[in-house]
Amino acid sequence: MPTVSLRTAHQAPPLALLAMEPLRAMFDFAASRLAFAPAQQIGDGHPVVVFPGLGGAPFTTSHLRSFLSGCGFTAHCWGRGVNTGPEGDFDDWLDGLEADVRRWHAQSGRKVSLVGWSLGGIYARELAKRCPESVRQVITLGTPFASLRGSTHAETLYKFLHGDVAQLTPALDARLRECPPVPTTSVYSKTDGVVCWRGCIERKSALSESVEVEASHLGMATHPEVLRIVADRLAQPEGQWRPWRRKRLA
């Protein structure tokens, strides 16, 4: 299967897809509430930290966290309020998040899984690179780690909330593409109206994969299939990670 070149200049999704995002997200949420229940007690209780997307407040990931708690995981909000982007130097800012991950690891005695939605996935990946001894696995939802500049509609919102994108140098851009040294799953949608799906593709390896879903970007954290995939990935015994295999209906 041909791979997508990480050097390709990707374009942001069509404006028609972007315009449909709010309505599609409502349908994704309704489908999750009406037709999908947690897979009871498939989790082993290990801590899972959920990072919201750009502009996302804790309530935007509350459904996902509630679902994971119902599955038997110990789900945590990232604990930093609204995600307006890194403050000041990126690496200095990550120091605080790294301290949080190490604290959760120390308090529970278990490695921590990190689930990041959109920009939150960038944080999750970088934290796993900084303290892999504390991280069990990483799951990103609609995170364009392979192509941030010029290929997302979120760039305008980032500038509005944070000022500019001057920190995203070619060196940092290349660093963000690097896969964490822990099991990593990138969930993406070809009908994502906010970010270019090609920028969400992770190179397949023994510890990394990309899983396609049919979801909106704004509804990614509530879509029934996404919830099922996240729970399945997290439920794998530590040290026995295997790639996702879509289960056929009987």
Image (cartoon, helix red, strand yellow):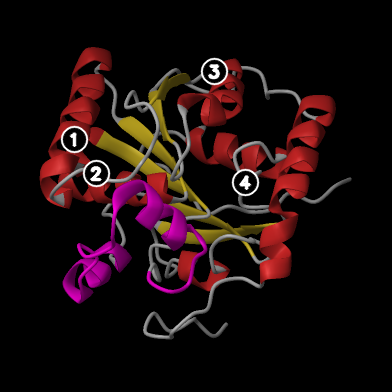
In the image, 92 versus 135, the foreground residue is 92
Label 1 crowd bin: few (<14), some (14–19), many (20+), radius 10 Å: some
Point 41% across, 28% down: residue:
48
Label 2 crowd bin: few (<14), some (14–19), many (20+), radius 10 Å: many
Query: Is residue 156 highlighted in magenta?
Result: yes
Do we see residue 215 in this rendering? no
Q: Secondary structure at mark 3?
A: helix
Q: Report the Cα–Cα distance between label 1 and label 3.
A: 23 Å
x and y percentages locating residue 245 in the rendered image: 64, 54
CB within 8 Å, label 1 to label 2: yes
User: Type of residue at label 3?
Assistant: Ser
User: Type of residue at label 1?
Assistant: Glu
Q: Secondary structure at mark 4?
A: loop
x and y percentages locating residue 230 in the rendered image: 56, 39
First in sequence, mark 4 or 3: give its number.
3
Range drawn in magenta: 149-177
From the image, state whether disc 1 or disc 3 is nearer to you: 1
Which numbered marker is on residue 98?
1
Q: Which residue is mark 3?
A: 69
